[in-house]
Image (tube, helix red, strand yellow):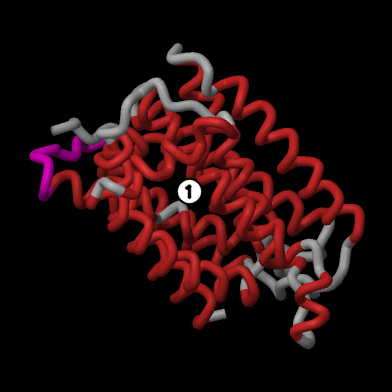
Amino acid sequence: MVLGLSAALAAAVLFGFAAILQAVGSRKVPTESELDPRRLGRFVVALLKQPAFLGALVLNLAGFGLHFVALRLLPLYLAQAGIAVSLVVTALLATRWMSDRLSALEWSAVIAVCVGLGLLAVAAGDAGESAKHHGLTIGVVVGLIAIAVLGAVASRSQHGVSTALLGLLAGLGYAGVAISARLLEDGSLGELLRSPTTYTLPISGALAFILYSLALQRGSVTLATTPMIALQTIAPAAAGVFVLGDAVRAGWWPAAGIGFLLSAAGSVILVRFESVKPD
């Protein structure tokens, strides 16, 4: 439990730094970019030419390594709540580097996230077994196809609604990462290569990363990030508890529910501190 939670919090620190860099890099790429196979290559190349974006990519990859450890050791709802702490990190960075100031409400939100995470940690039971679940695996594959199609449609618009929709789809993509990590079986190299989740994991991550970058181009970071955080936290948590057997300690369901709500509410308030002004 301690190792998994430490890994989740360390990943949150890296994701908090990466969010700012990704916003800066994405906004330097022309906003006519869209999730179109004919243009995707040019879009990715343009992103990779931005030093800030490359920094975000490195930090996200390092953060995912730590997040993967947390996903294998903790119930999904606790691992994802730990990652939501990245918003606290970003808020604190913004106050130091971007001349933002935390109001009493925002400081309350910081405390709420920390208290909520503490309640979840105390209430968490054992993580369910990481085993095959064909129905959930099929659901992830079908979900990826739907996310890609809807993302291609949403990216054709520069309207604020497309920002929120792309952020939502990115959140579902990151949810696929978390679920795939739990479904990934321990075994030989041959078994790993035959497992669908070996492929859905990186595809989910890459698709979500691109969709979030597209969302950051089109509107405020607040509008892009709020649905992303919500979906990447709630969807895996539900799958973990209702499908994969993640446990809550006996008699601690009310505390777990309060902890989850506190973390979610605090995260939504703090999302606005990911606002980055383009150079």
Residue at the spot of label 1: 263
222 vs 156: above or below: below
Q: Determine the main secondary structure of the stretch shown in magenta.
A: loop
Region in magenta: 96-105
218 vs 96: above or below: above
User: Residue drawn at (19%, 35%), measured in percent from left and top?
Assistant: 103
Q: Secondary structure at mark 1?
A: helix
Q: Is 5 covered by the magenta stretch?
A: no
Q: Which quadrant holds the N terminus?
A: bottom right
Q: Is 99 covered by the magenta stretch?
A: yes
Number of numbered discs: 1
Q: Is residue 102 visible?
A: yes
162 vs 100: above or below: above
- Residue 141 position, x and y percent, is 79, 48
User: Residue drawn at (44%, 32%), measured in percent from left and top?
Assistant: 214
195 or 236, which is in the foreground?
Answer: 195
Please indicate whether residue 49 sits to the left or right of residue 85 in the image.
left
User: Residue drawn at (47%, 72%), measured in percent from left and top?
Assistant: 66
204 or 67, which is in the foreground?
Answer: 204
Quick one: which residue is furthest to the right in this view?
134
